[in-house]
Amino acid sequence: MPTDDAGTDALERGNERIRDAAKWLVASAAAVGAAMLAGSQLSSIGELHFGAPDSVENARLWIAVLGAVAGLSAVVYAIWTAVQILLPKLVLVSDLDRAWAQRRSELAPVVDHFRRNPKYLQGFAAPTEVITAREQLVAAQREPSTGDDVRAQLAAGIADLDERITAIEDTATHEALKEQFRRALRKLMLATAVAALGIVAFAWAANPPAHQPTADLRNARLVDAYLRDVDLRDARLDHADLTNADLTGANLTGASINGVVWRNTTCPDGSNSDDNRHTCAGHLS
């Protein structure tokens, strides 16, 4: 049974399409990794510090680190998986023969393909038959008693078997590459999901909400001001006049209160400054 050059060319074109797809996957994964690295330059992760007193800041930092590690690891894994498809691959007829009786062999899908389509075995029922046939012809050719005419016929038979074996190996290699690509796609889908989660986590954690600017109320006249539950964290209140002001529930954490006029002022804790030696210092929460 002569081999079909058109069929061989079709297999080669199929292999090239698979490898082209793998190259595209490698380029895509590399682009995702590059975008993630570029995005890290635009993040505010530098504002987060290990051991910061703010537990939320600590949590954001760890989430950013873990997200970056997960995202980049998934990208590297995706690239590595796709690159495996680009490596040279050849399934020999001897490899197919060893896998023929093994149900859990890596080549099991290839064996199943040949079992479903015996025509691809080039007239043989199993790989072992073509191997045995070739060995018998080679042994007969090497017999000292074999005449030149018979030896020439045996050589032609061996060449024909070699062509059949090549066709079988081409088909087996193509099917193995297809199966490898299918498996790689499943792995790449998982890696893509992990990379996406990592990138989202990193982007969220590395870009904390911008702090509101500190209120500058130095020397402000806040007489009779109604400041209940006002957020005055880190505010500058130096020398402000808070006569009769109501600061019940206000947050003055970190506020600067040097020289503040406390006169009949309701402090954040609800006490009166006149009862606290004319100050709200120590009663800011």
Image (spheres, grey):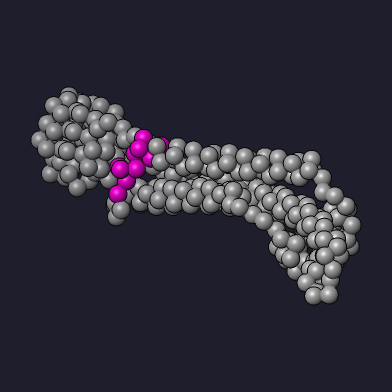
Q: Is 12 situated left or right of 34 in this image?
A: right
- Relative image position of residue 49 (x, y in whole percent): 30, 49
Taking depth in this image into account, of 230 and 127 the one nearest to the observer is 127
Q: Say which residue appears at 17% left-offset and 38% top-offset.
A: 256
Of 111 and 97, the residue lying toward us: 97
What is the x, y in percent for residue 279?
15, 41
Q: What range of the chain is rendered magenta? A: 39-49
- Residue at position x 66%, y 41% from top? 16
Q: Which residue is drawn at 19% across and 28% down?
A: 217
- Placement of the C terminus among the 4 image quadrants: top left
Count of numbered circles on the image: 0
In this view, the residue in front, 70 or 270, is: 70
Residue 63 seen anywhere in this rendered image of the structure? no
Q: Is residue 29 left or right of residue 255?
A: right
Which x, y percent locates residue 121? 84, 57
Q: In which quarter of the image is residue 5?
A: top right
Q: In which quarter of the image is residue 266?
A: top left
Report whether residue 255 is seen: yes
Instruction: Name, please, the residue furthest toward the front.
Output: 148
Which residue sits at x=82%, y=57%?
156
> Does the magenta run of residues contain 105?
no
Q: Which residue lies furthest to the bottom in this view?
A: 144
